Amino acid sequence: MQWMADQLVGRVSALWRYPVKSMLGEQLERLQVDGRGVCGDRAWALWDHATARVASAKNPLVWKELLAFRARFLAEPEPGAPAAPVAMQPAKAGAADDAPALHSSDPEVNERLSSWLGRSVSLLDRPPEGASLDQFWPDVKERQFQNVVNELVLPAGTFFDACPIHAISTATLAELRRHEPSLDFAVERFRPNLLIDTGAATGFAEEAWIGRVLRLGENVELLVDGGCPRCVVTTLPQGELPQEIGILRATARHNKVVAGIRLSVLSPGPVALGDPVTLMEAP
């Protein structure tokens, strides 16, 4: 489907940010976009002393349990300010002996996190120069790599994998469900910042937006840099969702392992649920 310039293509249906990389995050009614991305998103991460890598569920052979924890900010993050304090807690009752929330300011935060995860880690609010993570590629025949672990170097000065903001549409989720109705394509598996309700649009609708600009509400403008290739994280248990390798295999079979889009910031500002999403020509 071809989209016309300055066309309303949807509305913001859900918003998330993830204060600590690879932990469960916060679903919000509004958030702030700054030049870096969603303000506060992936502001913190764990550093693994054994491998000198950022801890990431992209390597579930080691870090699958990160998704068993939830992180939330104790104060609203401010653009350009130091990382706001964060609280971390097991996401399910009974986990880690019903441990109370652990705050980033706790003098024993690193010791307690290490005890929870069984590895020596430190909580960081800024990445070391040249920071990287390990990513595991499972047995999905459509992928170039299978059953191997590769190093992924992170964008300088961030804990992002590749892009500042990630969005997915209701049309893409519906298309995957149409192809594989037995699988639960819960949006949370894809860990987006934005869920865009595209109404009656069909297929992998947002891929028609690549190279153009999305305006959210009145001020925020985001460049659609490309499609978002999926990884093993979509298959892992998180919250109440069970492990399901079929999620990744389905995206591979039906859309070359892509689901959603990667975005970068052209104009910052606030975003709220219900905001119109308008497609425009790139500057």
Image: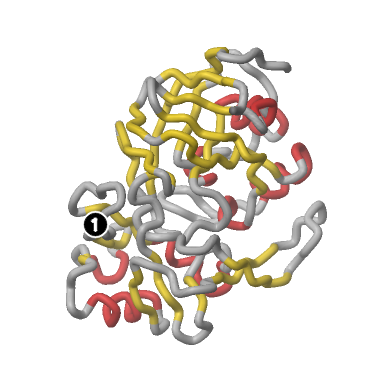
Q: Which residue is mark 1?
A: 84
The image shows residue 185 at horizontal and vertical percentages of 57, 38
Q: Is residue 256 left or right of residue 202?
A: right
Q: Quadrant of the N terminus?
A: top right
Within 10 Å of disc 1 (Cα), the crowding (few <14, some 14-19, many 20+) is some
The image shows residue 258 at horizontal and vertical percentages of 69, 42
Judge by depth and name the residue closer to the eye, 219 or 29. 219
The image shows residue 89 at horizontal and vertical percentages of 27, 61
Q: Is residue 10 above or below residue 90?
A: above
Count the labels in the image.
Answer: 1
Q: Is residue 39 above or below residue 161?
A: above
Q: Is residue 137 left or right of residue 198?
A: right
Residue at x-position 33% and y-position 56%: 70
Q: Is residue 82 above or below residue 185?
A: below
Residue at x-position 34% and y-position 66%: 125
Residue at x-position 57% and y-position 13%: 7
Residue at x-position 35% and y-position 78%: 122
Judge by depth and name the residue closer to the eye, 52 or 117. 52
Q: Quadrant of the C terminus?
A: top right
Query: Which secondary structure lies at badge 1?
Result: loop
Q: Is residue 157 left or right of residue 146?
A: left
Quarter of the figure with residue 117: bottom left
Judge by depth and name the residue closer to the eye, 283 or 96. 283
Q: Amino acid at mark 1?
A: Ala
Quarter of the figure with residue 28: top left
Question: Outermost residue, bottom direction?
Answer: 50
The image shows residue 41 at horizontal and vertical percentages of 38, 51
